[in-house]
Amino acid sequence: MARTSILPDHRLRGCLAAGVIAADEALDADQIQPASLDLRLGRRAFRLRASFLPGRGVRVEDCLKPPLVMHQIDLGPGAVLETGCIYLVPLMERLALPADLAARSNPKSSTGRIDVFTRVISDGAFAFDGMAPGYRGGLWLEICPRTFSILVRPGDRLAQLRLRQLGGKDQPASARRTRDVSLSLAPDGLAGFRAKRHAGLLDLRALGGHDPRDYWEALRPRNGQLVLDPGEFYILASKEAICIAPEEAAEMAPIAPDIGEFRAHYAGFFDPGFGHGEGAGARAVLEVRGRDVPFVLEGGQTVAKLLFEPMDSAPQALYGATGSNYQGQGLKLSKLFAPWPGSVEQD
């Protein structure tokens, strides 16, 4: 495996100036994060019959015709993306990667916390969420709301992108620092939240504007255990407090993706500075979906792993330096929701 390092904010700005990153509209002031770039929705959406990959040598645009495309939607005035449907939206950003840079995308944390499944598709792709060195072209976001229908508009941000510098000697995967992440289940406290079915619409621009009780039910463990029901979506928290140093970035990964009883839906990028300077750090929020059969989770059970990567250089602004909804978090819902009554979600 080639040695890689993640580009920080000031190098992302350099990529923008050099044309490695380009956009249909000028970037928003807060669009560049310490180690990632937020990606913005364009002005139209395609309602798809099924997901797809274009394959080598095929442009995404050339695939967008019946019977794959059912109809088009103008996002300009705002449009509802409905639960259980698949949409494809061209993004405002595009790439012209040199031979020593690769890109990887991931859902934003707020996207994962409302159970909206997203992944980026690029021209000629035979895999999701990855753009190889030398890629030149546009980016498209596949969106599938799984629990809540969402109201979106052009410019909304559901995914993010990291650029990786390639070079140096090969580095075995075993040489990368990792950390196991286990589940927090306080004996008598709030264990997490389970999403309500058939809840109302979520407006992605109404930050803090939704009553969480209309969308979630609070869960408390019994005897230190929590039973996951098949097909239900849960927000849980890590037992460990996480701290990402300025010279590192991290990504969450499942420890056993073949487990049939539950599957974590991770929005996995952790930027430099997450939990840093907070004393005890910050908890990782876990997005979990039950599968197949009911399954018992216990406090302290390992459910995920953090994979650390070096930064190319320290970012100019660490995570949380200019304000963040999730810095210093405990068990916390998406920023779209008002605090849970009594602010117990911060415990």
Image: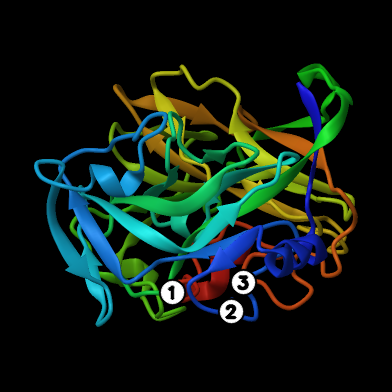
Side of 73 relative to 299 (left or right): left
Query: Where is 82 relative to 263, above or below?
Result: below
Q: Position of residue 55 (x, y in %)?
A: 37, 30
Distance between mark 1 and mark 3 Cα atoms: 11 Å
Query: Where is 28 relative to 286, above or below?
Result: below
Sooner in the amino-acid sequence: mark 1 or mark 3: 3
Sooner in the amino-acid sequence: mark 1 or mark 2: 2
Mark 3: amino acid: Gln
Side of 87 relative to 55 (left or right): left
**Residue that numbered label 1 is attached to:** 155
Mark 2: amino acid: Asp
Q: Position of residue 209 (x, y in %)?
A: 40, 81
Quadrant for residue 91, please give it.
bottom left
Closer-to-camera residue (144/113): 144
Closer-to-camera residue (187/41): 41
Residue at (28, 79) in percent of width and height: 76
Quadrant for residue 302, please give it.
top right
